[in-house]
Image: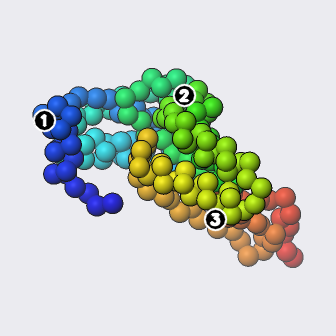
Amino acid sequence: MALDRRAARRLLSEVGLPDGFDTTLLVVDSPRPYMPAPLQLAARLAEDLAKVGVRARLRTVASWSEYIDHTTRGDYDLAVLGWQADTTDPNDFLTALLGSESIGTTNRSRYRSEVMDALLKQGRMAADSQGRLRAYHEAQELFQKEMPWVPLYHVSTFTAHRALLRGVAIGPTGIVRYEKVWKAE
């Protein structure tokens, strides 16, 4: 999707906000593997939003636990969040991030859709892999249409270790496993 500020300003006008609006952007200075520089990211977002008339004042909280508390309760206008998958099963992150039953826990956008819930249930209950694939594909299409939150980027993480260290396993989600590590002589 290309950046289109003219379209953004037009959409704001269409909803009766030709001069934009004021809002807050919740942020915490707590780097994560998927968001290494949250304050810089929030400042850049505020700058970009201002170019279309959305005046976002940064609202900084003191700790990660306070941040999670605010976002879990829905106590924010805008927030910068991320996700690091620990499994490759689409249900484990689609349900956590988009399922109505996850509101108040991991669905911090508070997105609620009966259609999405039905697709996620269909994916969980499908007897075959093609049925699961179809359901989760449709769920992703619905997400793209309704866009309850905006994916900004995907980070790559790197793991370095000495050649003498053997048995280090890095899973498909980037999680490092040390259970079978040993040092070569």
Q: What residue appears at the point 68 percent right and 63 percent down from the top-left corner?
A: 130
Q: Residue 87: which quarter of the image? A: bottom right
Q: Is residue 79 visible?
A: yes
Q: Is residue 136 left or right of residue 67?
A: right
Q: Is residue 75 left or right of residue 92?
A: left
Indicate the amino acid at tag 1.
Answer: Pro
State the residue in front, 39 or 21: 21
Q: CA distance from mark 3 to mark 2?
A: 31 Å
Residue 104: x %, y % from top left: 58, 26
Tell me the residue that label 1 is attached to: 18
Residue 171: x %, y % from top left: 71, 63
Q: Secondary structure at mark 2?
A: helix
Indicate the amino acid at tag 3.
Answer: Thr
Other residues around mark 2 within 10 Å, as few (<14) / some (14–19) / many (≥20): some
Whether residue 175 is situated above or below residue 71 in the rendered picture: below
Which tag is nearer the camera, tag 2 or tag 1? 1
Q: Is residue 80 left or right of residue 13?
A: right
Q: CA distance from mark 2 to mark 1?
A: 31 Å
Q: Secondary structure at mark 3?
A: loop
- Which mark is drawn over residue 72? 2
Q: Is residue 108 left or right of residue 147?
A: right
